[in-house]
Amino acid sequence: MAKGFDFQDAPGHLIRRAQQVAVAVFNEETAAFEVTPVQFAILNALIDGPGEDQVTLAAKVAFDAATFGSVIARLEARGWVRREADAIDRRRKRLWITAEGQRVALQMKRAVARAQTRIVGPLDDAERAQLVSLLAKLVAGHEAASTGTAG
């Protein structure tokens, strides 16, 4: 009888390993841009929602609000994001993607699409759809539980 925990088939371990694979593949495909998955998500969120405040944007991309400012600062230093104090509440920071940031984000889309295809490459079409559906359900269920909206 094994004394240790059989982590090889544990969902948490497999999700962590899948995340490692996903980040490695993303980094390989987007190496020319020197961008992280979170930075790419921020740029795309700002394309869809220009002028979003920093706290709301951090929640949209599911990133820790406490360290979000340093990620924004790196994007700002590259000239991809512009940050301004809100006209009404100067403590609140609003964000916009720059023309250069939008140009680069749109260039990255092909590389990111290749990464997504590679990540699920070992699966057939039905399995890909099932995986995405189950992951979305898992995330939504935990988000609902954490906000108290679970039914």
Image: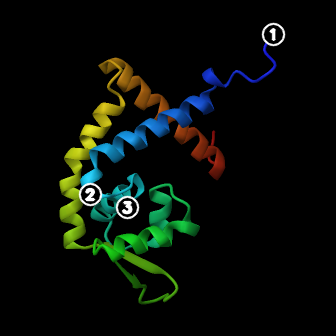
Q: Quadrant of the N terminus?
A: top right
Q: Nearer the viewer, mark 3 or mark 2?
A: 2
The location of residue 143, given as percent across then percent down, is 58, 46
Q: Residue at x 42, y 43 (%)?
A: 23
Residue 88 in picture, x, y percent from top left: 46, 89
Residue depicted at x 53% and y 41%: 140
Numbered tag placed on residue 34 in the rendering? none
Tell me which residue sits at (65%, 44%) in the image: 145
User: Where residue 40 appears, x then y in whole percent?
Assistant: 34, 56
Q: Which residue is mark 1?
A: 1
Q: Is disc 2 surrounded by few (<14), some (14 to 19) or many (20+) residues within 10 Å?
A: some
Earlier sequence position, callout 3 versus callout 1? 1
Instruction: Name the quadrant containing residue 138.
Output: top right
What's under tag 2, amino acid-wise? Phe
Say whether residue 128 is left or right of residue 93.
left
Say which label, 3 or 2, has the lower sequence index: 2
Mark 2 highlights which residue?
33
Disc 3 secondary structure class: helix
Q: Rounded to the nearest whole Å, what is the CA distance between mark 1 and mark 2? A: 50 Å
Q: Are marks 3 and 2 in contact (CB under 8 Å)?
A: no
Left or right of 107: which side holds 38?
right
The residue indicated by pointer 3 is: 42
